Amino acid sequence: MKILIVEDEEALSESMVQYLSREGFVCETAYSLDQAAEKIELYLYDAAIIDLTLPDGDGLSVIQKLKRITATTGIIIVSARKALEDKIRGLEIGSDDYLTKPFSLPELNARLKSLIRRRHFGGNNEIVFREIRVNPYSRQVFVSNRETHLSRKEYDLLLYFLSNIDAVLTKESIAEHLWGDYVDSADSLDMVYSHIKNLRKKLAGPSEAGYIQSVYGIGYKFRSL
Amino acid sequence: MKLLTKTSRTYFLVSLVVYLAASFVFYVIIRNVIYREIEDRLLLEKYDFVLFVQKWKHWSDENFFVENKIQVVPLKGGEISQQMVFKDTLMYESFEGEAMPFRQLTFQTFIDGKPHMVSIRKSMLEQITLIEVVTGTMMSFLGILLVCTFFIHRRLSKTIWLPFYDSLARIKSFDWTRQAGKGEEVTFPAGEIQEFNELNLALTRMTTQICHDYRSLREFTENASHEIQTPLALITARIEQMIQSENLSGEQLHWIQEIYHSSRRISRLLESLLLLSRIENKQFTDVAEGDLAASAEQKLGDFSDILKHKRIRVEKSLDQPFRLRISHALQDILLSNLLKNAIRHNHPDGVISLSSRNGVLEIRNTGPDLAVPAEVLFERFRKESGDKESLGLGLSIVRQICDCYDLRVSYLYEKPFHRVIIMPATRTPAAPEEHTPTPGTVNS
């Protein structure tokens, strides 16, 4: 999967490239509107991550151009603007998703994967990890070919983990993924803990500890080993 | 009082006084002239009379045929006074059959060596009619003139002040939040009156400045907070990469966790401050009519997970809707801040009750004792001392939003309930239930 990252803050761009490359994406970067325009003329991308505030103009023009050239390219806007009207404007112009800075890399990765699933497989391809099989279209989960019933949040949590296998996810990023802005207190971290406990019970793992490993003080990790 | 009413009224009163005074003075002058004329003639007749009695040594009424014209009365004693007296009198005139006004000159003289008092009279009938006609005509013309000038003045004032009223209307409808956003500027058409043109020029300069200041303030706060979010995004991203490393000690992880937590906190603070300034600058203009109570109920649904998790019981008594014209985004923020508070400062197995009746919306929740006076909670960065996570801006934002829409929000604490009450600011602050504690007090 080939991704274009349009972000003027070079270190942040590099950070995204590093994280997403680990997940198997081939990333190219553009630091300005001009560079982005040039790259989308020359190459075909499966998805693009676009910052709206670029030194030489508004990222929205890149989106319009991309939509004209290849309609299949999925677009995620990454912006510091959180206002609802900015989000609506971004979605209206043809982007598929909108993330506000500061965002979490696992979150970006999860959204990118979900976007690519929707774009290229009609959301119908199954996610398979060992004995766990998830059908994103019907939201069904099978463990060793037996259907396991997960609550809505447990399902979201599992999918978030499966999108970021072997990566440490902070408690905060998990809480934000599950409840968005609604919850930002100690309560939400509590809830993350209890959901993880339930999910662990429902997914039998290779060892006694299961797939989900706690990382001291920080968060959790879904282990492939 | 309106400008035109004021000038018209003043003009009218002054004109009336001038009119009355002028009429009076005119009457007096005319009357004096006519009296002087009559008196001169009476003096002439007196002279003729004296000559006559000196020559003929006697006076007889038969000498004169005009009725009441001359009256001679003999006086006792031998002395006469030289005094002459003019006076107005009424005499019966047989021709008209009624008493008529006369001017009379009375003097004393010797007729044939005997003292007599003589009164010579002249009818004033014609003269009085003359005075009346002249004064009346004069007053009518003056009156017509005054009425005409009054109306001309009114008409003129109206047209002259027209540009002023036009400018007034423009400045009244001037809305910098809307106009500055669109980059429009208020224009005032030039007229022929210099003062108004100067006024318009001053107004144009002021409104342009206001729009400019407003725009730059808005852009500054927005740009500043967005500029800060990017480095914060980098910090978060780098931390997330760093924690992927296997060989971090527990202590290092702990520090990283703290850095991560603080950077998220800064980001949330920035967001809240930006929101406050956006509300202050009235940047939310997309108002729509809605029912706050129904929205609150709906919003509570978004929190179902955490309500279930904390085993918080929800009681609802939404008897009447709470109708309000409000920006959708602000309504969302208002309710979510209030409900978040009600959940966060609640204890497990607690209660949240939502009620709406008689135009009063109340969110009540159980929770620990308040450590600070309730009213203080609306101040920025004021929070319950025990809560580390809270930014202390939630209720400030709530108050700011309420201020924008003329709502009064108050926080009451009656053990064990925390109550947030929202009502229109026009209502008297009576709590909706029978017991009414004073706002801002803590009962413990």
Image (cartoon, coloured by chain):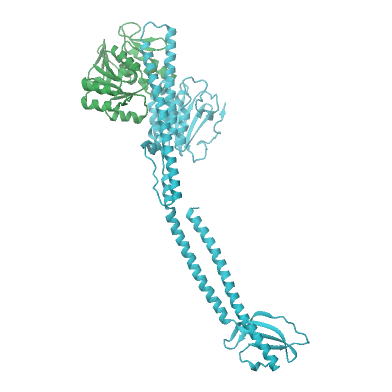
Q: Nearer the viewer, residue B414 or B185?
A: B185
Residue B144, image x and y in percent?
A: 48, 68
Q: Which residue ends up furthest to the right in the rendered image?
A: B77
B147 horizontally vs B243: left or right: right
Q: Nearer the viewer, residue B2 or A32?
A: A32
Q: Which quadrant holds residue A51?
A: top left
Residue pictured at 51% horizontal, 72% vertical: B138
* Figure colour of chain B: cyan
Chain coloured green here: A
Residue B232, image x and y in percent?
A: 40, 19
Residue pictured at 62% horizontal, 81% vertical: B40
Q: Quadrant of the C terminus of chain B?
A: top right
Question: As displayed, is residue B117 above or below residue B328?
Answer: below
Q: Nearer the viewer, residue B359 or A8?
A: A8
B122 horizontally vs A200: left or right: right
Q: Nearer the viewer, residue B112 or A130?
A: B112
Question: As displayed, is residue B98 above or below residue B240?
Answer: below
Residue A136, image x and y in percent?
A: 26, 19
Residue B146, image x and y in percent?
A: 49, 65
Q: What number of labels is visible?
A: 0
